[in-house]
Structure formats: structure tokens, C-alpha cells
Amino acid sequence: MKKSFGKTPKSKGRRAKSPAMGASPAGNLTLQLEHVTLLSSSSSPFENLLEAAAIEQLPDPPAAAAEEPVDDRDCILSQDFFCTPDYITPEMSNAFEFDKENIACPKSPEKSVRTKRHRKESYPCNYLSGNLQSHPQGSELQPATLNLDTLGEDKPSRNGSHKKQNYVSQSAVALRCRVMPPPCIKNPYLNDDSSLINHDIFGDRRSRSTGYSPIVGGDGLSRYRTDFHEIEQIGCGNFSHVFKVLKRIDGCMYAVKRSIKQLHHDNERRQALMEVQALAALGSHENIVGYFSSWFENEQLYIQMELCDRSLSISRGCIPKGIETLQMLYQIAKALQFMHGRGIAHLDVKPENIYIKNGIYKLGDFGCATLIDRSLPIEEGDARYMPQEILNDKYEHLDKVDIFSLGAATYELVKGSPLPDSGPQFCNLREGKVALLPGISMQLQGLLKVMMDPNPMRRPSAKEIAENPIFLKACRTYSRKPPLYTQA
Ligand SMILES: Nc1ncnc2c1ncn2[C@@H]1O[C@H](COP(=O)(O)OP(=O)(O)OP(=O)(O)O)[C@@H](O)[C@H]1O
Ligand SMILES: [Mg+2]
């Protein structure tokens, strides 16, 4: 019981913790993250979770293409092929490359930025070696074939000379500058979502796209502005702003999360990438927010995700009631079962990180995700939902940390008032002294109590929770109708 007690609810108690020694992942592995291919002969945080995939062989473009003078008005370029760095392999980027303009690809990140207590010296050496160089505008995380073992080292190029391993050529980015943004086209395959799209958006984008109007941000070309039309800001965390956007090329809505501060330093970028890597490694699950893409722009990290309707929140009065509470608990337990089965702990389960979309609950915000085997740095989430053992720096059962957090989050939602972040009530909750809640079934209260047991070994696994008979009627055949909420 210490350190984190004074943390205010707004300032999350994220603290970096040391990984276990000698647990560094090893072995050859190919990682494919959507269009990203990572060739690793050493390690990546979530490499054991990804299946090997063949590297796409794309034909080399004519080398002259990159050297031709650019005339914006004479060119009709297809963004699909030409100008989206998604399609640029290292071979292609070699055709464009100039020594000074190449960008080294990132190695697996270390966690350090969001921490209250940073212990950089205790990170395993494989996360400290290498240098994640600064990215220019629109630097892609995806179009990469990365040898993580040799990052930052000189690599022989085609002609035998030694050059840095590249992953995005600035020429490719420059080519992108020549492209007009595609018009917003209403997606005819969407039934429900299309009704959400304001038709003025399309009219607006169509008319703008008839003239030459490259989309540039304050600092130059913006992939965000080129590829997306921003509708509105829908969320604000301690580290990120989240926007509802329309993707111009496919006419679908997404959420794009942008880091608030610019990530100037290697360790900041590495840490931010942890979230992306966890999301990509996890793959698809109905109760986990979907991940599409990510990139750096203006030294900020952008993450394109599935758009959800809202997140749960005591303060905003977005609280599931009655059977919906059971549905939420069941579905997030299923998400945790999926994650834990892949060796990943979330470490920041709380109402604000549980989203709802069409009546389905989804776990989001993987900014604290880590490996259960403790081979990655550990950064705990919001102190209000952390069990005692984490506050005492004991990390033997990281999956059970999530169980405590889910129990505490559910308890808070059922109780209808915010959990304390310090004081006697804070301590009581961590000592198993859970006050009874009037009007709530003893079965549910019993389950929450055991989920918040001070001894992590006595807490049920996510699978055991999901198999609890309490959910038999309410959740195994849960309705997909959007639930009703009490709104503040
Ligand atoms: N995919 C999404 N769909 C809808 N809303 C979202 C989505 N992702 C995030 N949000 C909203 O944005 C808020 C902040 O997002 P998120 O929690 O990921 O940011 P953060 O800076 O990591 O937050 P935290 O303070 O928890 O660290 C969420 O609480 C939620 O309300
Ligand atoms: Mg959050």
C-alpha cells in the first residue's frame, strides 16, 4: 500500500516495472501486421503470438520514377498503387532511395513514457539496443520488412555497398504529396453505418476534389488529412485524443487515436508502439476493439481502429443496468480469456476502456498491455482498479490483475459511484472487504468478491468467469439489440 494512493482519478497510475530477467524471446519469426511484414531474427514483444507469413513480393518500380521532376498538374496518379507507402517494399524503396532520406524501421519499443516510476536501467538489453530514428511526416509503421535483429546496423545493399536498412523512402512520401485526396464515396455495402454518414460530407469532398487541393497539415503533408475526413472528437484520454473519421477511399467510419504529445524520443515512440503491437498481435475478437492501421505523423502516433458508439463511464452516466451488467461482465471476461490465452495481459481494465458498439462490449486501450510471462516491461494502469499485489510490485499473476480490475470496474458500475483512489475504502477493497450492494443479486456480488480476492491465486480465471452459471440465461445467447443506458 503505497505510492499510487495519492494518484488522482484523472492521472492514471501507470508505472513502469522491470521485466523478469532472462526471459527474452528468441528465434526466427516473420510478423505480418496487415500490410506490415516484420522479419525478425531476434525478438519482438508479441512475436510468439503471430503466425509466420510469406513476404509479399512486389515488382520493382522503374527507378527513374523517383527521380523525375514532379509536376503536380501533369500527373494523374492512382493512390491505390503509386502513392500509398503501404505498397512500398524495401525493394521498392531502394529504387527511390537517397542516402539522406531513408528512415530506419523501429525495433520493439521499451515502455517508459507514461510511467510514474521509470526504471530504464532494468529493461532487458534487447529492448534498449538499436535506435528508433525520428520519422518524418506520414512515416508508415506498416510497409516494412524489418530485420529487428539488425536494426540500426549497416546492411549490404543491392550493389554491395553498406546502407541502413530502410522502410520508407521520403521520395515515396514526396510522391504522395502529388496526389489529390480521393473523394469521399458513400459505401453502398453498408446498411446501418451509411445512415450515420452525413451526406453533406460527400458533397463537400466531391466538390473539393474537382480542383487541385493537396491536403497538407501545419507541418506539411498529412496522411491523416489525406486519407480521412475528420467528423468530430469522440474521446480524450490522458495520452490521446480520439476522433470519429470517415475514410475517404472506402467510405467507412473509423476511430483514429492520436497521441497528444509529440513523441520526440526513441523510448517514447517505442512505448507508444507497444499498444499497436499488442493490438496487431491479438488479431480479431468480437469483444476486442478492431485494429486497422497505424503510422507516425508529425511525431505523433495515429492508430486507426474500429469505431464504437461510446465507452462506459460513471462520470458521464454511461452505465449498464440489470442484465446488461451481466452481459458486459461476460463479454469482457471472454475478451480477457482470448487475450490471456495468447499470453497477453491488459493491465488497464476499467469502465472508460470498455466500449460498446451495437450492444456488444469491447475492450480497448491497450496502452498498458504486456506479456504475462513478464518478458516485457510492466506498466500498470489506473491505480483505482489495481490489486494490492501490483502496488507491492509483485507480478507473478498478471492475468489475475485483469480479473481484479474487471471485478472492481463492475463493482463500480453496479454501485454507481466512483471508486476511491486512496484512503480506508481503497484499502478495504484490496483486503477483500467488499461492502454489500443493496438490490444486487448475491450471486453477482459473490462473483465480484472472489474476483477481487486479495490472493490472486484464489481469483477465478477469465475462462472460469465466463463459464459461471450466472451467465447461463443472460449472456450465452445475448441480444444484439443496443442496450438502454442511464444518461447523466
Ligand atoms: N475505437 C473507439 N471507438 C469509440 N470511442 C473510442 C475508441 N477508442 C477510444 N475511444 C474513446 O476515447 C477515450 C480515450 O481513448 P483511450 O482510452 O484509448 O486513450 P488513452 O489516452 O490511452 O486513455 P487513458 O487515459 O485511459 O490512458 C476512450 O475512453 C473512449 O471514450
Ligand atoms: Mg483509456
Image (spheres, helix red, strand yellow):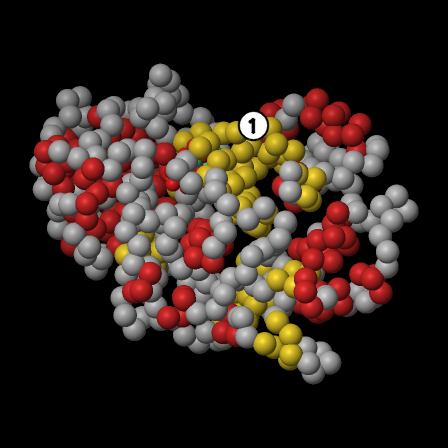
The correct choice, above or below, for 242 with respect to 173 in the image is above
Residue 117: horizontal and vertical position, in percent? 28, 51
Residue 372 appears anywhere in the view: no
Quarter of the view holding residue 323: top left
- The residue positioned farthest toward the right in the image shown: 74
Q: Residue at x 66, y 55 (%)?
A: 86
Q: Residue at x 78, y 30 (%)?
A: 208
Quarter of the view holding residue 252: top right
Residue 475: horizontal and vertical position, in percent? 34, 36
Q: Tell me which amino acid carries mark 1.
A: Glu
- The residue positioned farthest toward the bottom in the image shown: 160
Is 66 situated left or right of 147 in this image? right
Which residue carries the number 1 mark? 232
Q: Residue at x 74, y 58 (%)?
A: 171
In this rendered view, identify the residue nearer to me: 56 or 128. Answer: 128
Residue 184 appears anywhere in the view: yes
The correct choice, above or below, for 121 with respect to 75 in the image is below
The correct choice, above or below, for 363 with respect to 52 in the image is above
Residue 202: horizontal and vertical position, in percent? 72, 28
The correct choice, above or below, for 418 with respect to 261 in the image is above
Q: Quadrant of the C terminus?
A: top left
Q: Quadrant of the N terminus?
A: top left
